[in-house]
Image (cartoon, helix red, strand yellow):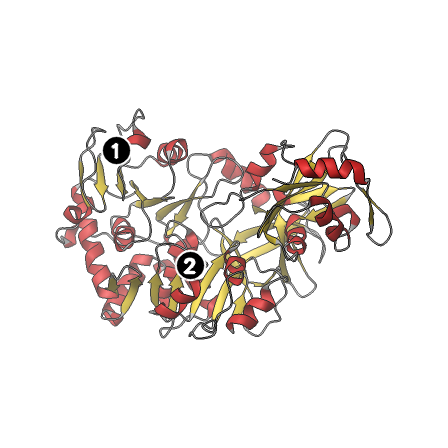
Amino acid sequence: MLELEPRSWTLVEALRRQAEQNGDAIYCRFSDGASCTFGELDLASDACATGLGRRGIGPGDRVMIIAGNSMEFLVAFFGVQKRRAVLVPANAELRGSMLTHQISNSGPKLIIADRDLTDDLAGHDLSKIVGFIGLEHAASDRLGIATESFSDLCMEVDRAAILQPEARDICLFLYTSGTSGSSKGVRIPQAHAYLFGLQQARALSVAKADCYLISLPMFHVNALLMSLGSCLLTGAEAYITKRFSASQWITDVQTSGATVTNTLGVMAEFVLQQPETAQDRQHRLRRVMAVPVSAQWADAFRARFGIELVQVYGMTECNIVSFTSADSELVAGCVGSVSTEFFDVAIVDPETDEPLEPNKVGEIVVRPRLPFCFMQGYHGIPETTVQAWRNLWFHTGDAGRLDEFDKLHFVDRMGDCIRRRGENISSFEIEQVLLAHPEIAECAVIGIKVDGAGGEDEVCAYLVSRKHALDLPGFLEWCAGRLPRYAVPRFLCNTEEIEKTPTGKVKKRALRDRGLAPDIWDREMAGYKLERDAGRTTRSPGRLAATSEQNRG
């Protein structure tokens, strides 16, 4: 593994070393048939950097890329770094105001895209943008911006145009998913990007002989820095698909010859829901990084596919902070020991920032032990940066605890924790119980504030059934025998789909913003009562029948 001195922690230096030592080895294969060696990528990105330099892109300039997973994305990624410029990968699905927000915030000088952006950008101030590069062909010139193709950008190499970045240089703005407000551009220095790959390689024990299946989007830290980064540092091969498909997953595993891969959000559960086949163990896959891991499906997933599951804790802002070891017992939510070589971690009272004793749930706060191995603030919003770094700790917004063995446990997002009847309830834990119901395909649990609750929350569950809308009173009876009384949802909602971010995270803020929408069934209004003893229930059949019928669609 290329474990260079921290002052040499740049992705450009890592690529140079691999090109010199391992130049003919395949770095990436794409499911569309494209591939490149380390040496070919080094040369192609030199040509890209030359073209960028001739178009006025220099140190600190921003280049936005709006594209799906492709070879051109990879070439642009390294080419921009070789000008000591900043790549701004935007979600390829963004349209309208969500896209223009990121353009306005990042201030790109050049845009690279795999589609025509005329409709999205018409009417916006584009005076600071000097050019538009189309990945497949020159884009429409109706925006009044000079346009050309990516192939024209990468015509030749001029060594004088190639610059060597330093570990402290900002190389990326990665935008958070925006589940709690407008997306924020995380300023990522080279050393931070390098450490992502190093930590991921350690977590999954990635070696040169491995093949890494990557099905997450390259505009996300998981694919771009964790997965591709670990391959860059170890010399392993990456196999990149256009997108994740649960029904295609085992085929992708087999076709690629993958030995390691990642799942995020609901991906693992969606895979497990696919029909079992004789091919489920006909593969080379040995280890899967899964975030989060649920006790409801973890053992079934391991047994069905014959693999190990690894849990990690990290964020775009603070890198991979901890991960489980290969010989540790799998405990859902336990994300292993903190990497104390690189980070300090504490659990604090979210109101006072005072440290809490072991096994007390509070907010996870982190700070780096090495310079430039952490985000360097949110771009253009210093007040948000200061708030996140109050009292000299980065506040993750995650609820967790450290046990008596200093193992870190992730509990929930702080905003997703539900305060009811004096109890702090994890929405994640409720969701794992609900997902055990045979008719539930997916669910999302949130807290809703209602009049008369004294500022506390009521539990609301959005439910996607496998075949038809659930009988909500019947489902509630099922819940009552499996959840603490205070955690049984008051509100239930049948829905066909739960909206998610591109990385599989449920957009819970959007659900909370709906409040008490008309399609939400209220058990109290329906006269449904929970008994205080063994979790059994009583109900008023007449009122239930009428209310249930109105909420079954």
Q: Where is residue 282 in the image (x, y as percent from the top left)?
A: 44, 75
Instruction: Name the residue at 62% across, 32% down.
Output: 517
**Three-letter residue code for mark 2:** Met
Q: Position of residue 359 (x, y in %)?
A: 71, 57
Image height of 151 relative to 209, above or below: above
Instruction: Name the residue at 26% across, 37% down.
Output: 116
Q: Earlier in the sequence, mark 2 or mark 1?
A: 1
Q: Where is residue 525 in the image (x, y as percent from the top left)?
A: 76, 34
Image height of 223 relative to 300, above or below: above
Q: In this view, does 157 lie to the left or right of 528?
A: left
Classify residue 389 by image quadrant.
Answer: top right
- Could you say whether the residue bearing mark 2 is in a helix, strand or loop? helix
Q: Where is residue 455 in the image (x, y as percent from the top left)?
A: 73, 33
291 vs 79, nearest the viewer? 291
Classify residue 173 by image quadrant.
Answer: top left
Q: In this view, does 450 lie to the left or right of 271?
A: right
Is residue 100 something that shows in the picture?
Answer: yes
**Three-letter residue code for mark 1:** Ile
462 vs 357, nearest the viewer? 462
Residue 129 - label: 1
* Count of labels in the image: 2
The residues tagged by marks 2 and 1 sit, at their Cα atoms, a distance apart of: 30 Å
- Which quadrant is home to the N terminus? bottom left
Is residue 230 something that shows in the picture?
Answer: no
Image height of 366 relative to 510, above or below: below
